[in-house]
Amino acid sequence: MWLLSPLACLSIVAIAAGLAALLAQLAIRGGPVDIPRDRGAHKSPTPTSGGLAVMAASGLAIAFGVLELHAHVPQTGLWLFGFAALAGLSGAIDDVLDLPAKARLLFQIILCAGFASLYPVHELILAPGLTLAVPFPLGVLAATAWLVLGLNAINFMDGSNGLAIGTQAVCLLIYAGFVLAFGSQPVSMLGGVLLVFLATGGAFAGLLPFNLPLNRVFQGDAGSLFGGALVTGGALVLSRHEIASIWLGGFLLAPLLVDVLLTLVWRAQRKRNLFEAHKDHLYQQWLIHRDPDHGRLALKIWGLCALSCAIGTGARLIGITTGVELRFAALCLVVAALCYGWFRIRKTLTA
């Protein structure tokens, strides 16, 4: 068997979750604290280094898998985890120093371009019989744009307890499920990738209760950028190994991406500073004007992400059984429906 056994998979998730829960206590007792600000949704000073607990727990769980379960982590797993770790460490520095937005963006572009050069977009499957081959330079550019967009989408949406952390855990564990369901390559290629997804997904799940409902710690930019890099980079890795198309990441993050992109357009139309922190996202306006409960909002967003992924998976299964490729068309319909909902809810909240 080239994949980890079911018991080993559950063990990695449980160990990572337990370690994250333990290390979260250190984050709660020390480290930087986020002081309430006008753009924030919290009312009292809250520790904000939960993301470092997730990163440490993930690394320790991966080490356990290598040493005790004899899992092999090839270059693919190392590159993905290293890319995410660098993104997370840059977020940790920002949590302490509050770096300028343009400097953060420049570093992200450079980091994402480096990873994109290893895992560029090589083809776009658009419709039955219509597959667009992407030249290497354009593939790197497209992958870089996807990574930067996804990183910041998750970071921007990390303003409500549980929303981003839970979404990251769901996405990474779904990726692990895709490796188990559709992977067909030897252990030297996919066993380590599976290990990374299980460890990181479990670690985010372990941190989640301390963020929602306990409200005791935030993941900070360290956690949102670490998780964002794993989710966006993971889509490129799965596409490279033909486990999923690049559209899988779009399905999973569609609810977040729609809110982020339409909010940017909304602010640009009103000539507002796009690099300035604000509370104009739809989820923020929902908390202010409709329902202040973070838990109910998080459940809605998790449900939308899961439903979107289910639609994409259904389109994948239809393609396997009938040979009719529907994933891109299905993604377009999902995005259109989310856009319609965004405008409708925004109009209601404004009224």
Image (cartoon, grey):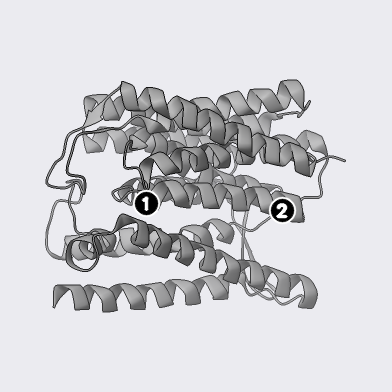
Separation of marks 2 and 1 at Cα, in angstroms = 25 Å
> Disc 2 vs disc 1: Cβ atoms closer than 8 Å?
no
In-front residue for pair 108/23: 23
Q: Residue at x 49, y 40 (%)?
A: 204
User: In the picture shown, does residue 251 fall above or below 215?
Assistant: below
Q: Mark 1 points at which residue?
A: 153
User: In the picture shown, does residue 337 fall above or below 273?
Assistant: below
Residue 162 visible in the shown view: yes
Q: Which amino acid does label 2 sit on?
A: Glu
User: For numbered disc 1, what is the local secondary structure?
Assistant: helix
Q: Which residue is drawn at 75% across and 28% down?
A: 72
| Farthest residue, direction right | 1
Label 2, residues with CA under 10 Å away: few <14, some 14-19, many ≥20: some
Of the residues tagged 2 and 1, which is closer to the observer? 1
User: In the picture shown, does residue 248 fall above or below 68?
Assistant: below
**Quick check: 43 left or right of 311?**
left
User: For numbered disc 2, what is the local secondary structure?
Assistant: loop
Q: Mark 2 points at which residue?
A: 242
Q: Which amino acid does label 1 sit on?
A: Ala
**Quick check: 73 left or right of 59?**
right
